[in-house]
Image (cartoon, rainbow, N blue to C red):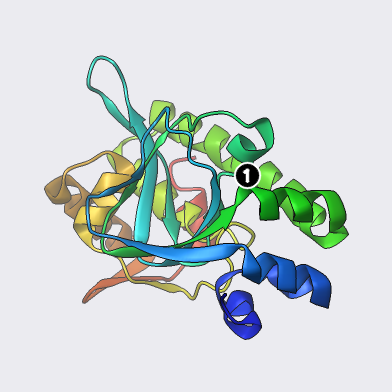
């Protein structure tokens, strides 16, 4: 069983729970590690856990029958996902791949539904989470269809700074150019060119092992 203070550190949603709810939540969570490029689960899997990223980086997406890969979202430490599939009791409709060595927290179905049925704070979080995730997916479809490569890179990075989906994130993001390319559907070389354009425009600063955001609002609206 994970400790209560550790739960609050890896799961921002738990900070509003009462003492009983925290005890139930921490008793129903285990952790598991995945290597870079390993599938956490695949589309169609009956993956019966609500999942949080403890450390690392994962990509949510799918590959069409014609072989085209599409990225829906990147998930950094602090992000929790899969509540829609849990609530609908359906197989996963996307792939989840670890882009680097990644550790995840897994909450079992019984615990998830106990919180869903008994915790007002947990339900408030789920409503906010589902609303934000819907907006994220609509935005991803929009910029994939309407923006050029630099715009897609800008929006992909900006999407990682949603305070509800990715709480406790600082303006410095530890991410490689190859990982940014994977999230944007681009090669590392193309992602590098796009990042240099964004840096020249004063929106971000390229640094060793990551990027620092200089102007988040311009990054969010790049290409409009």
Residue 200: x and y in percent read 28, 63
196 vs 78, nearest the viewer: 78
Toward the top, the furthest residue is: 66
- Residue 151 in view: no
Direction from residue 85 to residue 116 in the image, left or right: right
Q: Which secondary structure lies at badge 1?
A: helix
Q: Is residue 144 above or below residue 206?
A: above
Give the vertical position of 110 relative to 164 (above or below): above
Disc 1 packing (10 Å; few <14; some 14–19; many ≥20): some
Where in the figure is residue 25, as x and y percent of width and height? 68, 66
Using residue 35 as the reference point, say whether residue 163 is left or right of it.
right
**Is 103 situated left or right of 105 in this image?**
left
Label 1 belongs to which residue?
83
The part of the image, by quadrant, that contains residue 7 is bottom right
Residue drawn at x 45%, y 47% as measured from the top left: 222
Residue lying at 55% horizontally and 73% vertically, measured from the top left? 10
């Amino acid at each position: 069983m994970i400790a209560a203070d550790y739960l609050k550190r890896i799961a921002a949603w738990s900070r509003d729970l009462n003492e009983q709810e925290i005890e139930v939540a921490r008793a129903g969570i285990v952790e598991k590690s995945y290597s870079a490029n390993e599938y956490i689960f695949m589309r169609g899997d009956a993956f019966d856990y609500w999942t949080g990223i403890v450390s690392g980086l994962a990509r949510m997406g799918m590959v069409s029958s014609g072989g085209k890969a599409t990225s829906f979202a990147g998930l950094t430490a602090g992000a929790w996902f899969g509540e829609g599939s849990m609530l609908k009791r359906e197989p996963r409709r996307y792939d989840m791949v670890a882009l680097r060595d990644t550790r995840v927290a897994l909450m079992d179905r019984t615990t998830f539904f106990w919180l869903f049925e008994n915790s007002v704070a947990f339900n408030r979080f789920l409503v906010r989470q589902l609303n934000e995730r819907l907006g994220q997916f609509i935005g991803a479809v929009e910029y994939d269809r309407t923006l050029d490569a630099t715009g897609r890179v800008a929006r992909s990075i900006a999407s990682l700074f949603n305070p509800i989906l990715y709480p406790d994130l600082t303006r410095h993001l530890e991410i490689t150019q190859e990982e940014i390319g994977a999230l944007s559907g681009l090669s590392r070389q193309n992602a590098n060119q796009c990042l240099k354009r964004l840096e020249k425009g004063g929106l971000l600063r390229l640094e060793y092992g990551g990027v620092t955001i200089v102007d988040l609002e311009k990054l969010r609206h790049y290409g409009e």
